[in-house]
Image (spheres, rainbow, N blue to C red):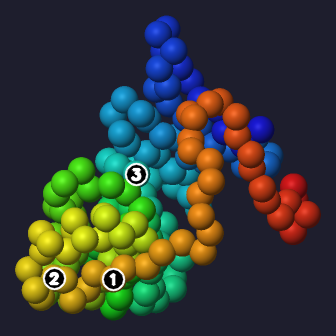
């Protein structure tokens, strides 16, 4: 087992613990307070958000991150937003904006940032909706795309999941 979730009496997840193969607990995610504790190199590190933990992890990797492709304006964007080495970010926007441009998207399209961001929108209606709400300068960073395949089946929100992996290529599995 690599993770264990603790629930309250009402069945709400309150804590998740991640373990090594040897069973040593290394990450604690508190869903009530939204903080994370990480045991790393013999020390305990406390982060007041999942985003702060990801930023720490990226800095510990010791690599110069210059370009990033991401698909949500939540945690991934917040984690990379202040990376000092980031030169270019590409958001692949697959969500629906509900008639308005999200605030984080407006921020990332600001010409005053040290990093340059672009937005790629595969849904043509969403693309048009977003572009018509942006300034001419902001529109220069928004691009239409599409999908390589058509979706034939609508999501029925069932409890069935199909997971495909190359598990034969995953070490130690």
Residue in the image at 33% along x and 91% along y: 87
Across and down, in percent, residue 70 comes to 44, 71
- Residue 80 appears in the picture as rendered: no
Name the quadrant containing residue 52.
bottom left
Q: Crowding near pointer 2: few (<14 within 10 Å), some, many (20+)? A: some
Q: Is residue 112 above or below residue 79?
A: below
Q: Residues within 10 Å of mark 1 (few under 14, many from 20)?
A: some
- Of tags 2 and 1, the one toward the viewer is 1
Whole-number angstrom distance, CA of label 3 to CA of label 1 = 30 Å
If the image is split into quadrants, where does the C terminus sit?
Answer: bottom right
| Residue at the outermost left position | 135
Quadrant of res 105: bottom left
Q: Which residue is mark 3?
A: 50
Q: Residue at x 36, y 70 (%)?
A: 124
Please provide percent x and percent y for residue 155.
Answer: 56, 41
95 left or right, relative to 169: left
Label 3 and label 2: CA atoms lie apart by 29 Å
Q: CA distance from mark 2 to mark 1?
A: 11 Å
| Residue 148 is at least partly visible in this image | yes
Sequence-earlier tag: 3 or 1: 3
Q: Which disc number belongs to residue 143?
A: 1
Instruction: Please tell me which residue is depicted at 49% across the width and 8% down the height of the picture.
Output: 9
Question: Measured from the top left, where is residue 138 in percent x and y?
Answer: 15, 82
Which marked residue is nearer to the observer: mark 3 or mark 2? 2
Q: Which residue is mark 2?
A: 138
Dot 2 or dot 1, earlier in sequence: 2
Considering depth in this image, is 4 or 128 the residue closer to the camera?
128
Percent from the top left, x then y, of residue 158?
A: 62, 31
In this picture, residue 123 sits left or right of residue 44: left
Q: Secondary structure at mark 3?
A: helix
99 relative to 5, above or below: below
**Which SS class for mark 1?**
strand
């Amino acid at each position: 087992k690599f993770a264990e979730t603790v629930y309250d009496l009402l069945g709400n997840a309150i804590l998740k613990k991640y373990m090594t193969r040897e069973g040593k607990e290394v990450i604690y995610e508190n869903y009530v307070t939204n903080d994370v504790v990480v045991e790393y190199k013999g020390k305990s590190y406390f982060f007041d958000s999942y985003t702060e933990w990801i930023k720490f992890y990226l800095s510990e990797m010791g690599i110069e991150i210059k370009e990033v492709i991401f698909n949500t304006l939540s945690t991934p964007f917040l984690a990379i937003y202040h990376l000092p080495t980031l030169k270019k970010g590409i958001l692949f926007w697959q969500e629906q904006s509900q008639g308005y441009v999200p605030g984080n998207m407006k921020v990332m399209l600001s010409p005053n940032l040290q990093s340059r961001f672009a937005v790629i929108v595969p849904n043509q209606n969403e693309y048009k909706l977003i572009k018509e709400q942006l300034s001419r300068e902001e529109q220069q960073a928004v691009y239409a795309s599409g999908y390589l395949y058509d979706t034939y089946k609508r999501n029925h929100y069932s409890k069935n999941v199909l997971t495909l992996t190359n598990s034969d290529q995953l070490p130690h599995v």
